[in-house]
Image (tube, rainbow, N blue to C red):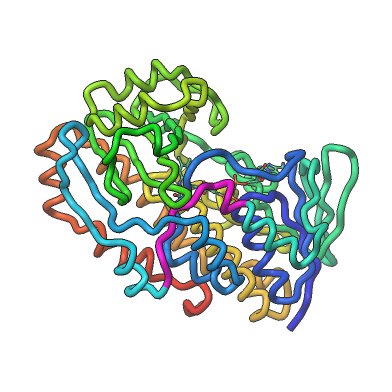
Amino acid sequence: MPSYKILIAGAGLGGLAAASCLTKAGHQVEIYEQAPAIGEIGAGIQVSANAMHVLRDLGLEPDIRRVGVHPGAYVFRLHDTGEVIQRFSLAEEHERTHGAPYTQMHRADFHEILAARARQADPDIIRLNKKVTGFTEDDKGVELKFEDGTAARGDFLIGADGLKSAVRRQILGDAVATYTGDAAWRITVPIERLPQPHLEKVMSVFMGPGGHAVCYYLRGGALLNFVGIVETEEVFEESWTMKFPWEKLKADYAGWHPALQAVIDHADKDQCFRWSLHNRPPVMTWSTPRATLLGDAAHPTLPYLAQGAVMSIEDGAVLTRTLAMEPTIPAALKRYERNRVDRTAKVVNQSTANRRLFHLNTEEAIRAEFSKRNEGADRNKWLYSYNPLTVELV
Ligand code: FAD
C-alpha cells in the first residue's frame, strides 16, 4: 500500500479526524492552521453512530464517553406549551440499532481529544499561525503557500479549512452563499443556576412561529447548551464569535416555554453570540488531481440536522480507504469524491429542508406535518446507518 506525505489546511474537527485516520493508515501528515492557538468555541456538538465508528477505530471511545452525554431521546415540542409532538429514542436504541452511541459533547472537549490523538502520531503534526493563501500543483505533488511567505510541499493537499475555505476558492471559486433568513444564537448555562427539575435529559427541539430552539446537556449534565434559530432580516457576519445583546435574545424568545426563559434569564449577559446562517448549494465535484476538500469546505451544511462535523469525519475515513484502493493519487481523490458527493448533498439538502419543518407557523401545521412523518425511522434508515469503515465503495 502506498504511503504519502499529505498536507491538510485547517485543524478543525474534520481536519484533525482525517489526520488521525491517515496517520493510522501509515501516511505522513502535516496540518496547517491559521489560528495562533488550538481550540473551539463554547458550544455543543452532537455525534451520531455514523461518525462514532470512525472515532472508535481511532481508539477515542473511552475519552468521548468520559466527556459526553448520551441523550435518552430526540423530542420535538411546541414552542409555548412544550407539548411533545414526536419523540424517538436515542441512547440504548441508537447504539443497539447502529452499533455505536449517539453523543453530545462540548466542542472544546471534542476538539482537544481529536488534537491529542493527532499529536500521538507526531507531536508537531499541527503547525499554528499558518494561514493558507493558495497552492500550486504539478504531476509530482503540491505546494501550499502561506500568508507569511513560506510554503510546504507534499504529495497532495486536503482543504479542511471550513466555510470560508481558501482551498475551495482556488478549486471552485467562491461558493454562492444565500442568506437563509435565519440567525443562530448560542449560549451555555451551568445547570446549578437553573431551577430544578429543569428539562429532561433529552435532545429537545422547541418549534414555533419564526424560529426554533434546541437544548441539550453537556459535561455529564453540568452545562446546558442552547442553540436558538430565529428568522430575521438583519444580516451580519457569518461568525460564531460575534457577540449580540442579551436583550435581543430575550425579545426573540418572548412568549416561549418557561424552561427556555429560565435558560435565557440565567445566561451570562455578555456571552450571547449570534451568527447569520447562509445556504450554499451542494457541488458535484471538489477535487483536482492533487488537491481535494473535506468537511464544510467541500459541503457546507446548515445546522438543522446536526451532521456537518459528522460528515467531515465520514469524509476522512472514506478518503483514507480510497487511498489504499487506488494506485495513484488522482484516482484515489476522484474515487473519494465519487463516493461522497451524493451522500453529503443529501445531508445538505435535508438540513436545508428541515428549516421549513422546524418553522411551521401554526400548531395545526406542525401537528399535520409530524403526523405524516417519523423522523427517527427515517434518519435510522439512511443517515445513522452508514458506516464509513465498511460501506461498499464504488
Ligand atoms: P471548521 O470546524 O470550520 O474548521 C476549519 C479550520 O480551518 C478552523 O480551525 C479554521 O481556523 C481553519 N482555517 C480556515 N481558513 C484557513 C486558512 N486559510 N488557513 C489555515 N487554516 C484555516 N455538526 C455536527 O456534526 N453535529 C452538530 O451537532 C452540529 N451542530 C452545529 C450547530 C450550529 C449552530 C452550527 C453552526 C454548526 C453545527 N454543526 C454540527 C456543523 C459543524 O460545526 C461543522 O460542520 C464542522 O465544524 C465542520 O468542520 P470542519 O473541520 O470542516 O470546519
Q: Can you give x and y, in whole percent of width and height, for residue 380 in the image?
A: 31, 66
**How far across and how far down the image is residue 198, in percent?**
28, 40
Regarding residue 381, the answer to whether it shows in the image is no
Residue 343 appearing in the image: yes
Which residue: 69% across, 69% down?
22
Report the number of numbered marks: 0
As rendered, which of 300 and 330 lies closer to the eye? 300
Q: Is residue 281 above or below residue 190?
A: below
Q: Is residue 4 magenta?
A: no
Q: Which quadrant holds the N terminus?
A: bottom right
- Residue at point 52% right, 60% down? 66
Region in magenta: 100-111
Which one is nearer the viewer's eye here, 101 or 168?
101
Residue located farthest toward the right when viewing the structure as drawn: 150
x and y, in percent, of residue 86 in the image: 18, 52
Nearer to me, 128 or 194: 194
- 113 vs 169: above or below: below
Q: In the image, is residue 133 above or below residue 125?
A: above
